[in-house]
Amino acid sequence: MKDNLLTKILVSFVLAILAGALIGPSIEIVKPLGDLFLRLIKFIIVPLVLASLVVGVASTGDMKKLGRMGGKTVAYYLLTTALAVTIGLVLGNVFAPGAGLDLPAIEEKVEPKEAPGLMDTLVNIVPTNPIAALVEGNMLQIIFFAIFLGLGITMLGDKVKTVQSFFEQLAEIMYKITGLVMRFAPIGIFGLVAPIVGKYGLSVLMPLLKLILAVAVGSILHTVITYSTSVKLFAKMSPVKFFKGIAPATLVAFSTSSSAGTLPITIKSTEENLGVSRKVSSFVLPLGATINMDGTALYQGVCVIFVAQFFGMDLTFAQQLTIILTATLASIGTAGVPGAGLIMLTMVMTSVGLPLEGIALIAGIDRILDMFRTSVNVTGDASAAVVVAALEGELASGQVDQVKGTISA
């Protein structure tokens, strides 16, 4: 079914290019299809993020375990995610996939909003009214609220079993709705891409090859450098052993474009091939499938630069710092389902005032990019499990003894 959807999206993208090129500006008549797709994406963002993140935090079920491993796990995920989006921004500036397009009509239409300062962004993460944050769709505040809801559920345990079950069921419902929305993606993408090609011509599609290359190179760099360093430094594990051990999960992730769908094979690979204990894998990996989205963050960094260049906008250093912060926190709420990265990209673009119409060009190749970023996400989950297991003395074979000696030294 996923392969079928990928084929439909690619066919739709090609048809949109052909229709736009052949028909010209009058293809604007299909634009409502694209607008409807954008509205459907916005429609599912808030409940999807809230439910998936609450379930991810509350799934520990044990405050001692959460206190011991939670801080290390979340810190590792946030740090590697920040590194990933930074790499994405750097490669976006180096490759310049959206630069060099002469689109004066678009430039006149765009009125970029002034991005808030970094300190203002940090302060505004804490909502004064969480219900208002949900109504307004303030994603950073929703993420903050969801984390504390999950913590509260964990602390109260069986007393709030009904509340936990509610969010678990809501999360399942939202995953299903997300799948339904993504089925509409081929039609929506046609409605988004065809009018742009019809108005501006085939030249607007040229940066896409550079965009794919930038994401692919970034994924390889982040995987090889960041994860090799972390497993070698903290777990004294050979990077070759790590990559060979997690290879089955990485390949499944590349094929399915779903972190959640890959979770069973990720747990199996880390336990059997890398020596991670069940205690650690059952906590770190499900949490990672929900909140650890290094590949998605890297993709967002590249794509935001691409869209800014496409619309002829220059992002300041402060705005790029805001992108790092927003993408890092937004990745926490990215559910591990196909297409979710495209949904969360709208949040990051909004944080620096970029028009959402810019995702039209990205949407057509999103599933191709999804293969790269999901592979990075899953490999990152496994590296976190290895590192946390080593720090907790839960890594099998000689690995744990070496780490204990390092920590006590």
Image (spheres, rainbow, N blue to C red):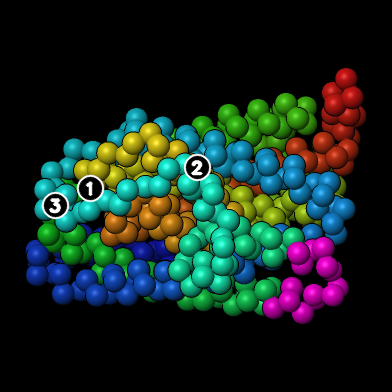
Disc number placed over residue 108 in the picture, else none: 3
Q: Can you tell which of label 2 and label 1 is closer to the viewer?
A: 2
**Circle nearer the N terminus (3, 1):** 3
Residue 193 percent across, percent down from the top left = 24, 62
Q: Can you tell which of label 2 and label 3 is closer to the viewer?
A: 2
Tell me which residue sits at (28%, 70%) in the image.
34
Q: Quick check: marks 2 and 1 in contact, CB under 8 Å?
A: no
- Image-quadrant location for residue 6: bottom left
Residue topped by disc 1 = 311
Q: Quick check: marks 3 and 1 in contact, CB under 8 Å?
A: no
Q: Quick check: marks 2 and 3 in contact, CB under 8 Å?
A: no
Residue 48 percent across, percent down from the top left = 55, 69
Tell me which residue sits at (65%, 30%) in the image.
228
Residue sitting nearer the eye, 122 or 206: 122
Residue sitting nearer the eye, 187 or 84: 84
Is there any visible trace of residue 246 in the rendered image? Answer: no
Q: Secondary structure at mark 1?
A: loop
Q: Residues within 10 Å of mark 2 (few under 14, many from 20)?
A: few
159 part of magenta stretch: yes
Residue topped by disc 2 = 119
- Image-quadrant location for residue 380: top right
